[in-house]
Image (spheres, rainbow, N blue to C red):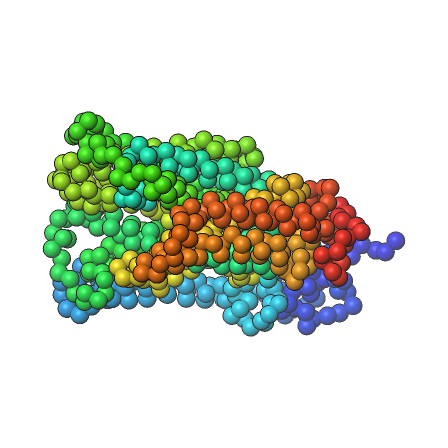
Amino acid sequence: MAPTPSTEQNFRSNLSQFRWARSVQDDSQQPQASSGGNPFSRFYNAVGGAYVPLRSNERSNEEEAYFALSRWERQVTRLRLLGFGACLLGAGACFFVAFLTLPMIALRPAKFALAFSLGSLLVMFGLDYLLLCRGKVVSRRSDMCNCPECQTWELQPEPSTFAPNSRLSNKDMDPVPPHLRTWTTTNYIMYWISDATNVAVWELASSMLAIGLSWKQALPAIAVGHCIIAVVMVGNGTIGARLHVPFPVLNRSSFGFWFSYFSVISRVVLSMFWFGVQTFTGSECVYQMLKAIWPSIARMPNHLPLSANITTSGMMCYFLYWLIQFPFMFISPQKIRWLFVAKGIIVPIAWLSMLIWSFVKVPFRESKLFQESANVSGSALSWAWLSALNSALGIYSTLAVNITDFTRYAKSERDQYIQLLIIPLAFTFCGFIGIAVTSAGATLYGNVFWDPLTLVNQWNNRAAAFFASFSFCLATIGTNISANSLCAGNDMTALWPKYINIRRGQVICAFIGGWALCPWEILASATGFLSFMNGYSVFLGPFAGIMFTDYWLVHHEKVDVPSMYRPHGRYRYLGGVNWRAALALLVSVTPNMPGLINSINTNIKVGGAVHVFDFAWIFGFFSASFIYYIASVLFPAKQTFFDAVILEDHNKSVEQITINSDPDPEKDSSSDVKV
């Protein structure tokens, strides 16, 4: 039996595996496989707590690096946190300095404030970059670029990943391990209560009453729409609760590895756009809060031209809200649930208070909107009701697609079933509150204020105005994080997993969606683009339908999770594209195009084809599901059908899974999976 290697031999052997030490080779070095997720664990395991010095004539970079490792590990986290906190404080200080000197600056004060703040944020990222570069001892080789700058930003993949390399996955894309599955039934209840209490849901009934429906017809449309969306949410959410993978990964099983990026990119663009719109809504909440404290803000002189489509005070409030919202993007999805718990307690109290106020001020029988009847009848009433139903479905049609981004953190599959009940109840009741309070405002002030912030602006009680505006501000933050920035972060992680994780994706979304898209310009002038984004549900319905049908009806809950991470695995189909999904998407979206064009430009007449667009989500979901199911039954992708369910929990490492590859992925495989 060979003699046991000495401690020095083990140390030198492990040390030689690092990139910066590979130039030092001798006969005593034996290659070893890496173990554990910590790149320094080889040192700790080999030395065992007692360091044996090298021979005196070999003291070089090896000894110095060994001691530098421990110092670096202790200091880097502390330095990065200190630098990050200092730069955030600097950003806030620059903003308030600019704000206090606004009266003394005659030229573009808003841009002055913005330049100060963005400059300090750049300092933050620069300092973070320097700290990452300084003393960096271990770095993985880049698959595409070996320059130090790129290696600095590389994310280290977990050793349990199913992807063949770091370009295809990272920690945030991997299946969620059991100890990070923290969402319970209570968290999902609070999540949906918090999402239901936002300005968009408050204003939902306004679009229904505007097309001629009465409140008695609008409320059932809200209830039925959210019952339908709840079924889809739970259906697709169950997949995430079982497999614990994010939407971009799960989507590969139905669309194909590469074609799935179409839906992912669509979600990124949509999330960034609505992030900016919601941020502008939040800035209006901040304005009402500041006005309740300092009424003189309403008289702040405007130094911006009319073409800017925003005032000086508006820009100030926009940046202030953006700055308040920004730190929440650094909270992990496992812990962000506490924000929804806080929002789910505070905001409903404010909404119930406003409901009580409305009934105290104006009795039900005297309320204006409650006494109005429908203005349409016959077939026009039917089409109007279907359009109202589509509005109710469309408001959260995005989450029906990527609900797995949240249910993947469920402790158990049963925890997310409560969505079937809480979604229709919460959204219907919040829609009723919007109608009741708006109706009371119409009776008291003579005008119908569907925007709750405009209604709050009519109040003389400054304390009530502040707390109501604060509740809407908190509601907007929670909705923007959950429905927009987190979704964008997950999707961008799939696009560049080697360099982007959820946190970095959210930061990118905050800058592009919050500033580059200029949401105040879109809301003020780009009505056609706004109509297009509102009509984007023509794609979201088919996306949700294809995912739902593929898992439940075509493959009968039997999927191979490791293959979702491999470009040449089971779900490659033909060149990475599942033509069945492409066909279903084409057939379901095309009939909605005339109505979408008409919504963008009403001068373009499309005749009766516009009615299909009135129920675009329903049509897209069911037509895509039907076409996809028929195509999959008549022309099955045989390599995707098997008897076993392959989950990440059943395998400790990727080496334990062997998938038989076939040169033609559309042909049947003689051997499916060996575990």
Residue 118 appears at what percent x and percent y? Answer: 32, 64
* 568 is higher (above) or lower (below) than 175: below
Q: Is residue 577 visible?
A: yes
Quadrant placement of the C terminus:
top right
In which quadrant of the rendered view does residue 25 lie? Answer: bottom right
| Viewer-nearest residue: 31 or 268 | 268
| Residue 429 spot, x, y in % from top left | 34, 32
Across the whole image, how many numbered discs are drawn on residues?
A: 0
Residue visible at 35% across and 55% down?
Answer: 599
Q: Which residue ends up furthest to the right in the rendered image?
A: 1
181, 531: nearer the viewer? 531
Coordinates of residue 377 in the picture (x, y in percent): 31, 38
Q: Is residue 175 above or below residue 424?
A: below
Q: Position of residue 654 (x, y in %)?
A: 70, 51
| Residue positioned 67% across, 47% down in the render | 633
Give me the residue at 66% from left, 54% from top: 571
Left or right position of 479 against 243? left
Q: Left or right: where does residue 50 sit relative to residue 306? A: right
- Tell me if residue 175 can be seen: no
Determine whether, in the image, residue 661 is placed left or right of residue 253: right
In front: 214, or 134? 214
Q: Residue at x 32, y 66 (%)?
A: 119
Pick the front one: 379 or 646: 379
